[in-house]
Image: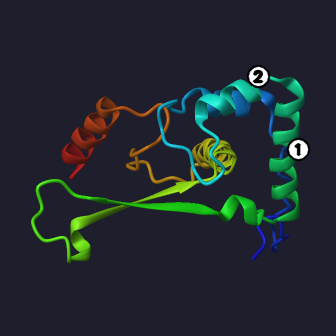
Amino acid sequence: MDLLEETPNKPVTQWTSFSKEEFKSSINKCNNTLISGPNKLSWRHLKVIINDKSCLKSFINIANTCINLGHWLSHFKMLTLIIIPKPNKGLYGTPKIFRPIILLNTLSKLIKIAIGKRLQLQSISKNVIYSCQLGRLKQQSTTDAGITLIYLIHTS
């Protein structure tokens, strides 16, 4: 089912275009030392490129067009697979001894981060997420998890 498709008793929800602030806040939290993907574009380089207003506008146009058309570019689907042997393992003939790492296109990851942040904020504001779900949520801490746990224990 299409996310923008109209369902009975529910109006069509339109995707709001990305803003410059969304992209800038998404990229600022990315680690400069992470290995680049198949496009060989590192986070450090992308941060410099995104400071150029015309480049940032182009990236936002690409992201918005992908969302509006419902099409993810094949260039964004390319990946590089690196297989690293786990330390202190004897026989390297067993697949369990290796750790595969998948490196995605850097711009694709940036768009996914921006989408993820937006979906998380929307789902929290619409009370879609179960109240005890705290893992990887923004503005949630171990203190919040502890308080929730204590509340659940006392109410049981």
Q: Is residue 48 left or right of residue 68?
A: left
Q: Is residue 123 left or right of residue 60?
A: left
**Displayed quadrant of residue 89:** bottom left
User: Badge 1: few (under 14), some or many (20 or more) residues near its Cα, within 10 Å?
Assistant: some
**CA separation in Å, label 2 and label 1:** 16 Å
Q: Is residue 151 left or right of residue 130?
A: left
Q: Residue at x 59, y 34 (%)?
A: 43
The residue lying toward the viewer, choosing from 137 and 95, is 95
Q: Is residue 23 left or right of residue 33?
A: right
Residue 137 at x, y percent in the picture: 47, 41
Task: Name the element at disc 1.
Answer: helix
The residue lying toward the viewer, choosing from 113 and 76, is 76
Amino acid type indicated by mark 1 = Asn
Amino acid type indicated by mark 2 = Asn
User: Badge 2: few (under 14), some or many (20 or more) residues near its Cα, within 10 Å?
Assistant: few
Looking at the picture, the colour scheme in use is rainbow
Residue 3 at x, y percent in the picture: 76, 66
* Residue 51 - label: 2
Residue underneath mark 1? 61
